[in-house]
Amino acid sequence: AQSVTQLGSHVSVSEGALVLLRCNYSSSVPPYLFWYVQYPNQGLQLLLKYTSAATLVKGINGFEAEFKKSETSFHLTKPSAHMSDAAEYFCAVSGTNDYKLSFGAGTTVTVRA
Amino acid sequence: DADVTQTPRNRITKTGKRIMLECSQTKGHDRMYWYRQDPGLGLRLIYYSFDVKDINKGEISDGYSVSRQAQAKFSLSLESAIPNQTALYFCATSDSVGGGEDETQYFGPGTRLLVL
């Protein structure tokens, strides 16, 4: 079985500051890992995914995440926050050939001007 | 036009009523999913279907049923709605053709359900 834990339900950053969202996973098989973003009143949109290729994954809107097997982590970062990054972010995991996603509880990001 | 659509987008119903939420997709994907989202709990899988003849329970299927009418349509029913089924419901699709490395799920805009 796979699961993820997102540390921090709410993160507040200043515009231009680093955004760091933490995700740790548990998986009995090599995992596939995802970050999704949910803007207000919208569905979920894929930011990026790790599927056993490069450990540093670049996504849309300047986000990236690094897969660290030794730490069982897949933290999401963006060097400089923009007001448009205000949203809820979900980390998710699936097992190889599992095709089902297990989601974390989500982290809401607010960006201060 | 959106690839994954859900109807209705908002619904208010009363305890004990039967309600159906519908999902349609034009992506040509064979796999479809229903999730519910509750604050602080993330998304939890209700049911999933890997093709028209394949329906599987997720982690929270009690009180729900589904129907896969066609490859493109996957409906979620609440036979007798109760207040703790008040939530945001999402449909999603994925494609098996890409193999294990293409697990990406594509989500609809959601249906906000309130059970009084």
Image (tube, helix red, strand yellow):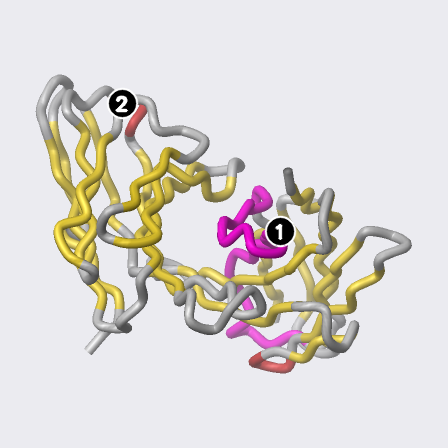
Name the element at disc 1: strand
Chain letter of disc 2 in the image: B
Could you tell me residue A59's position as x and y percent? 61, 78
Q: Is residue A51 above or below residue A60?
A: above
Q: Quadrant of the image for the N terminus of chain B?
A: bottom left
Is B37 positioned to the left or the right of B18 in the image?
right
Question: Going 72% across and 69% down the picture, which residue do you hit?
Answer: A52
Name the element at disc 2: loop
- How many C-alpha atoms fall within 10 Å of the one at disc 2: few (<14), some, or many (≥20)? few
* Residue at the outermost right position: A70
- First to last magenta residue range: A81-105
Could you tell me residue B10's position as x and y percent? 18, 47
Is A49 positioned to the left or the right of A18 in the image?
left
Same-chain check, marks 2 and 1: no
Identify residue type, mark 2: Gly
State how far apart marks 2 and 1 are (Cα): 27 Å
Say whether residue A82 is magenta: yes
Is A78 positioned to the left or the right of B72 in the image?
right
Identify residue type, mark 1: Gly
- How many C-alpha atoms fall within 10 Å of the one at disc 1: few (<14), some, or many (≥20)? many
